[in-house]
Each structure stands twice: as C-alpha cells, then as structure tokens.
Image (cartoon, helix red, strand yellow):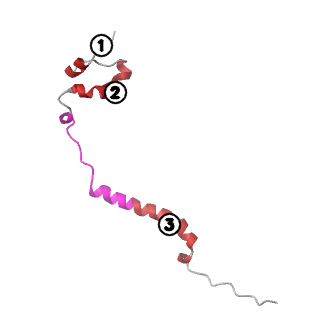
Amino acid sequence: MSPTSAPPAPQPWWRYGHMWLVVGGPLIVVVASFVTLYLAIRTPDPVYADAARARPADEADLTPAMQARNHAATGGVAPKAAAASGAAAARP
C-alpha cells in the first residue's frame, strides 16, 4: 500500500496562468481604449471652415470628381471647356 499524499495547498488566483489568458485580453483592450481616448482629446482634428478656398483655379481639374458624382444624374461626361466655365453639358 502506498501512503496517500495530501492535496497541494490552493494558490492565490493570480498564480494561475489560464486566468491571465481569460482576463488579459479584455484588460489590454480597456487600456488601449483609454490610450486612444487620451490621444483623441489631446490632439483633436482641426476644423476646416472654408471649403471655397480649397478649389483649384481651373475647375477642369475637378472633372473626374464631378463626373463620378453626377454620372448617375446626367448620364454623360461634361466637355472640358464647359466644365472650366462652370456650365453643365446638356444631353439631348
């Protein structure tokens, strides 16, 4: 007969490795969210107040953007001269 050994003494909760696998992930996410909040408050995005100043002198440069935006409504591409003068091309 072999002598029975006593069960090991219970350890504190922080000594179990699988507990850190369960708690560690959400804990890292919470810490990262506070870091992100700090960065967002410390360096806010500037407010762009005047969009009219950002327009190029030659509006023909905007032709691809205007074409993509208005293609569904007009069904065609405005000629370069008409786009530069600001007039919309009428389609028959």
Q: Amino acid at mark 2?
A: Arg
- Using the image, determine if residue 58 lies above or below residue 44: above
Q: Amino acid at mark 1?
A: Ala
Quarter of the picture containing the N terminus is: bottom right
Which residue position is annotated with label 1? 90
Q: Residue at x 32, y 24 (%)?
A: 67
Q: Which residues are magenta?
A: 33-54
| Residue 13: quarter of image | bottom right
Q: Earlier in the sequence, mark 3 or mark 1?
A: 3
| Residue 80: quarter of image | top left
Q: Element type at marker 2?
A: helix
Q: Earlier in the sequence, mark 3 or mark 2?
A: 3
Mark 3 and mark 2 in contact? Answer it, CB < 8 Å: no
- Using the image, determine if residue 22 lies above or below residue 57: below
Could you say where residue 35 lies in the image, as x and y percent from the top left? 36, 61
Q: Earlier in the sequence, mark 1 or mark 2?
A: 2
The span from disc 3 to disc 2 (Cα, nearest Å) is 47 Å
Q: Residue at x 23, y 42 (%)?
A: 48
Is residue 9 found left or right of 44 in the rendered image? right
Q: Amino acid at mark 3?
A: Gly
**Is 46 contained in the magenta span?**
yes
Q: Element type at marker 3?
A: helix
In the picture as drawn, the residue positioned furthest to the top comes out as 92
Task: Count residues near mark 2 (Cα–Cα under 10 Å), then give few for <14, some for 14-19, many for 20+.
Answer: few
The span from disc 1 to disc 2 (Cα, nearest Å) is 16 Å
Could you say where residue 36 lies in the image, as x and y percent from the top left? 36, 58
Which residue position is annotated with label 3? 24
Q: Which mark is residue 69?
A: 2
- Using the image, determine if residue 25 lies above or below residue 68: below
